[in-house]
Amino acid sequence: MDDVYDPRTIDLRNCIGPLTGRVRAALKGAIDEALAHDEHTASYEVSAAQFLILSTLHSEGGESACELCKLMDYDRGAMSRMIDRLEHKGLVRRVRRSDERRMIALRITREGEVVLPKMQVCVVRVLNRFVRGISRSEVRQAESVLRRMLVNGGAAAG
């Protein structure tokens, strides 16, 4: 298979890497804004990154901070501060794992489970705004391409 990019002709500002980074940053900012201004979620003062933690804990269960760091590409200090904030807000709790007492698992609380669907409404509204004018099949194809890129790059495609 031929290479897609050529070092002599590549536009390093508009190839897949920088574009996905810019889309990620724009999505994060738009989600932060939506969560901060929604009547049902604003009082929780949850960021897009904190939403991702809650969403992951809801769907995957007792992830550790270390596992979340890998998933979200955050350093341990930043992750610890985000978890502290979520714990202070009553949305997550730290629990010792029964199988490995030295390990701390994270669990979403009842309050977190109550507010998460309200946050999801905000996030879906933002995602739909970003894909406006793009067909459902094009969105699914883009998702498939991104998952394949993760596999090609050696990361889990989740």
Image (cartoon, grey):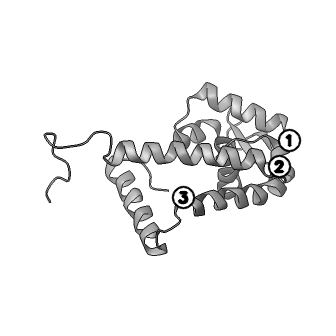
Going 73% across and 48% down the picture, which residue do you hit? 35
Counting residues from the start of the chain, the first of labels 2 and 1 encountered is 1
| Camera-side residue of 130 and 145 | 130
Contact? badges 2 and 1 (CB < 8 Å): yes
Contact? badges 3 and 2 (CB < 8 Å): no
Going 84% across and 57% down the picture, which residue do you hit? 114
> Could you tell me the amino acid type at mark 2?
Thr
The local crowd at label 1, few if under 14, some if 14 to 19, many if 20 or more residues have their Cα within 10 Å, is some
Do we see residue 25 in this rendering? Answer: yes
Q: Secondary structure at mark 2?
A: loop
Give the quadrant of residue 145.
bottom left
User: Which residue carries the number 3 mark?
Assistant: 130
Say the numbered circle drawn on residue 109: 2
> Could you tell me the amino acid type at mark 3?
Phe
Give the quadrant of residue 116.
bottom right
The local crowd at label 3, few if under 14, some if 14 to 19, many if 20 or more residues have their Cα within 10 Å, is some
Q: Secondary structure at mark 1?
A: loop
